[in-house]
Image (cartoon, rainbow, N blue to C red):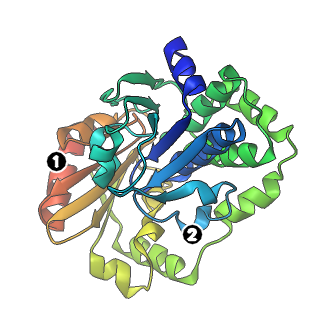
């Protein structure tokens, strides 16, 4: 970790933290953990979200730090983007992010564009949660049970519950440290995993029904229109994790979830198992991510997006 980053954070009187749009467990967990640690050391802290905290992560401590950015927002001494690969992932807060006299970008996406004044990108790290843990250690800030709960959630969700290839010995060492603060893993897991709503379950059923296998069953595709999503009563955030349905099929190397955001805007989530670098596929459409998990937005109809994605993946299988 850059000494200058440590110095800047230590010396800042006020800090605003920016997780990526459609914040996931890693983005929210890391942001609230860092936010609480900085607040506990006497700084003024804001966590500026693009959307409300997803229902599943409302249990996390530190939620009171979260709010929405608008033009009347106070300018912090320092703005920190967490888990954010490029400026596009800041959504409508992109301009606001650069308002501070100094900006820092802390992330683990291999495709990170290093858009801030100071950038700490470690693509080997399984999660921004791990990097945030190491950052707090360097800052010599106390990691209490509340902060540990947020970091545990960040790391557990980005490693698929410690199942993905990105999980390392370092991941488990950090988790051991977090557990020693007395957090209750059973309780946190229940909050994260055993909380499916009936509507989300119906959306899952719909996704299974719509799932298609291509390329000798090595590619799984689920394309969801807005009508598909809302007819089940589910919310947009309920689409989180649906890409794993295809991934769980034995023969599948790449799973794609293609989701209509509007008539002209299609969001694509990609997962791979062993050899296809999906961050390359996402990059074709100006998206990004990791080798095994990436995403992009395609302008067009859902059918057009589906065709383009299948074509791009086909060559790599
Ligand atoms: Mn992440």
Q: Nearer the viewer, residue 71 or 210?
A: 71
Q: Is 245 drawn above or below residue 276 in the view shown?
A: below
Q: Nearer the viewer, residue 1 or 186?
A: 1
Tag shown at residue 311? 1
| Residue 87 image-quadrant placement | top left
Where disc 2 sits, the SS reads helix
Q: Earlier in the sequence, mark 2 or mark 1?
A: 2
Q: Which residue is mark 2?
A: 55
Count of residue discs: 2
Q: Nearer the viewer, mark 2 or mark 1?
A: 2
The residue at the point 72 percent across, 44 percent down is 147
Q: Is residue 146 left or right of residue 204?
A: right
Q: Is mark 2 within 8 Å of ligand 1?
A: no
Q: Nearer the viewer, residue 57 or 186?
A: 57
Percent position (x, y) of residue 157?
59, 49
Single out the residue that lies furthest toward the top: 3
Tag shown at residue 172? none
Q: Quadrant of the C terminus?
A: top left
Where disc 1 sits, the SS reads helix
| Residue 301 image-quadrant placement | bottom left
Disc 1 packing (10 Å; few <14; some 14–19; many ≥20):
few
Percent position (x, y) of residue 283?
23, 37
Q: Is residue 102 left or right of residue 132?
A: left
Examine the rendering and report whether any part of residue 163 can be seen: no
Q: Is residue 98 left or right of residue 139?
A: left
Disc 2 packing (10 Å; few <14; some 14–19; many ≥20):
few
Examine the rendering and report whether any part of residue 208 can be seen: yes
């Amino acid at each position: 970790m850059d000494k200058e980053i440590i110095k800047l954070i230590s010396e800042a009187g006020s800090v605003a933290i920016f997780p990526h749009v459609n914040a996931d467990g890693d983005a929210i967990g890391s942001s609230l953990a860092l936010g609480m640690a900085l607040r506990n050391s006497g700084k003024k802290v804001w966590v500026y979200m693009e959307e409300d905290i997803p229902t599943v992560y409302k249990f996390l401590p530190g939620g009171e730090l979260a709010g929405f950015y608008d033009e009347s927002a106070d300018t912090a001494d320092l703005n920190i983007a967490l888990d954010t690969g490029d400026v596009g992932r800041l959504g409508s807060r992109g301009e606001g992010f650069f308002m501070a006299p100094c900006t820092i970008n802390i992330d683990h996406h291999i495709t990170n564009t290093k858009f801030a004044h100071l950038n700490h990108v470690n693509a080997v790290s399984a999660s921004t949660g791990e990097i945030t843990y190491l950052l707090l250690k360097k800052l010599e800030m106390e990691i209490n049970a509340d902060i540990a709960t947020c970091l545990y959630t960040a790391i557990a969700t980005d490693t698929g519950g410690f199942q993905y290839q990105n999980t390392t010995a370092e991941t488990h060492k950090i988790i051991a440290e977090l557990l020693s603060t007395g957090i209750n893993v059973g309780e946190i897991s229940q909050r994260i995993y055993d909380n499916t709503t009936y509507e989300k379950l119906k959306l899952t059923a719909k996704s299974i029904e719509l799932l298609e296998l291509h390329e000798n069953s090595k590619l799984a595709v689920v394309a969801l229109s807005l009508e598909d999503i809302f007819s089940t009563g589910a919310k947009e955030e309920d689409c989180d994790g649906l890409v794993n349905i295809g991934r769980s099929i034995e023969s599948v190397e790449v799973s794609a979830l293609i989701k209509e955001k509007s008539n002209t805007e299609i969001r694509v989530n990609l997962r791979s198992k062993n050899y296809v670098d999906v961050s390359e596929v996402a990059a074709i459409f100006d998206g990004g991510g990791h080798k095994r998990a990436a995403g992009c937005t395609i302008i067009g109809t859902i059918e057009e997006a589906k065709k383009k994605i299948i074509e791009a993946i086909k060559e790599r299988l």
